[in-house]
Image: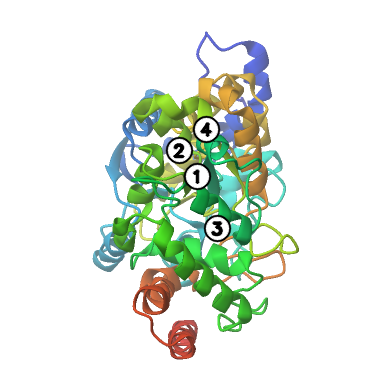
Amino acid sequence: MTKRSILANSISRRTALQGLTATTALAAMPIRARAQSNATIRWWSPQASPAQVAAYEFQIAQFQALHPDITVVFETTSDEGYAPQLAAAFSSGEVPDIVTHLPSFAVQSYYANGLVEPFNDVIEAIGADDYFPGANDVFQAADGNYCGTGIGNSAANMMWLRKDLMQQAGIESAPTTWDEMRTAVTAMQTGGLYGAPLPYGANSMTSLIFIGFIHQAGGQVFSPDLEVAIDNEGTRNALEFYREMREFCPPGATNYSWGESLTAFVSGATATGIYTGRVLANVRDQNPSIADHITCVTYPRMSEDIAPWTFNDFPSVFIPAQSQQKDAAKLFAAFLFDPEGYIQQLHAAPGHVLPVLQSINNSPLYQDNDIIQKYAPEVELMAASAAGGYNLGYESADHASNEKAGEIIGSNVISELVQRVVLNGDNVDEALGAASATIEGIMQG
């Protein structure tokens, strides 16, 4: 088949060849998809900063130039609101035709309920061999099919540090253990400056971040064969440390979710942060005075004997099974990885969404970005951490894929456990017993 590329004339032939695997997507898709006409496909994503939307519009325009009979309409969801929005869509049958940037565990849950189309042919169209090794493992369902693929990687629980504040406090190196972290934030918390922006609200961020703390204490939510195992010493230690950290967080942390936590560090209200690489662009745009003083490390754990555990939500792309435009949606899904548009999308939030394709990561066009170059060590660390990252749907390399993870996160059972023990002072045995029973009910439901 003839390989087609939409690369602009300004991109060198060498760069185009380095991204060739991704550009074969159009040629590899079924002919019937390319022949589909007068189709309108709806694209949903919770990632919708102005720069990202501009990149999406570029990708849509390039795709529609090649396929004038297919119209793509972009619609925004939200990180906290996508679950009820999609539930309503699935219930009514008025579904989007392609969804991106939802965590992998949500896609696994939807697929297990028959709501998502197998994605195998799209992965082959993109170029299965071009992915980083193991990148699609988290998307493999129990029936052997892939329920989606990654639109990028993320390292969502990196610890961000202010090197200038560390120096002022006499802290010579980044903390690697909880004891060191407690000492560091104690030294840096002065006046109106707080030590950390940890979330304590009844929301997904608290659940997802606290799962990381459980693993950083050597615990787990499930055993490898998916028996409920949250009532363990690691969870108890994590709850105690999370309680100790409350005094180092702003008063509003009781209701913090992703946006508030991010803003607290970027604005200079906290000495440390916990987030993905979106910190870098936000600091550049919103608080450039600290741009030369920030860095990141893997989040501290209870002891150095415990390996770091990075939360990667594996931002996804998938196609709802109820879509009436599946062929056009698959064609567009593969096109999202065409180098010029995909790199522009990654550059819209550099370091926040990291490439899943080796050819893109190695491309000079991708590397030619001010943030990626300025913070090369940080971006490299995030990429390595994300590549070895996990989430509740894929807790470790030994764990089976958990198709109920999305429902568990959506129930807020873990964030409510944090609130009961940390904020309300409830008995830890009773709170863990109730959380275990709730999770068990979801697993059996």
Name the residue: 53% across, 68% down: 241
- Position of the C terminus, as image quadrant, is bottom left
Residue 12 sits above or below residue 185 on the image: above
3 or 4: tag closer to the N-terminus: 4
Relative placement, left or right, of 11 versus 78 is right
Secondary structure category for the residue under label 2: helix
Relative placement, left or right, of 127 versus 66 is right
Secondary structure category for the residue under label 1: loop
Disc 3 residue type (three-letter)? Arg
Label 4 sits on residue: 164
What whole-number distance in Å separates the C-alpha atoms at marks 3 and 2?
Answer: 22 Å
CB under 8 Å between callouts 1 and 4? no
Label 1 sits on residue: 276
CB under 8 Å between callouts 4 and 2? no
Label 3 sits on residue: 182
What crowding class fits label 4: few (fewer than 14 Cα within 10 Å), some (14-19), or many (20 or more)? some
3 or 1: tag closer to the N-terminus: 3
Name the residue: 39% across, 56% down: 249
* Dot label at residue 279: 2
CB under 8 Å between callouts 1 and 2? yes
